[in-house]
Image (cartoon, rainbow, N blue to C red):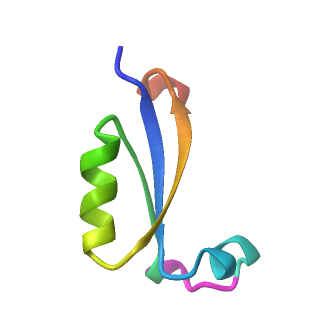
């Protein structure tokens, strides 16, 4: 099975972790195409935080 990663896209990681970035400015999703999706979000102007989501979607 492909590994799953959780991608969090934010404009300011410090504000995101402190809970002060408005939720409409951040998004989080799960993917197995880490390099492709992270590159796309970086091109869209986001800073990307990556964490492991599990070995399949049942683990998320």
Quadrant of the image containing the N terminus: top left
Position of 35 with respect to 48 (left or right) is left
Residue 54 x, y percent position in the rendering = 53, 27
Q: Looking at the image, which residue is at 42% across and 25% down?
A: 3
10 shown above or below 33: below
Q: Quadrant of residue 16?
A: bottom right
Q: Is residue 28 magenta?
A: no
* Residue at (43% x, 32% y) in the render: 4
Region of the chain picked out in magenta, as a range: 20-24
Counting from the top left corner in percent of width and height, residue 12 is at 56, 81
> Could you say which is closer to the camera, residue 59 or residue 34?
34
The x and y percentages for residue 57 are 43, 28
Taking the spot 60% from the left edge, 74% from the top edge, the residue there is 13
Q: Main secondary structure of the magenta part?
A: loop
Q: Is residue 37 above or below residue 26?
A: above
Quadrant of residue 52 in the image? top right
Q: Position of residue 50 (x, y in %)?
A: 51, 50
């Amino acid at each position: 099975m492909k590994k799953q990663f959780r991608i969090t896209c934010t404009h300011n990681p410090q504000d995101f972790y402190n809970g002060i970035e408005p939720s409409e400015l951040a998004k989080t999703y799960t993917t197995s195409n880490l390099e492709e999706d992270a590159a796309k979000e970086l091109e869209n102007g986001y800073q990307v935080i990556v964490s492991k989501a599990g070995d399949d979607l049942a683990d998320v």
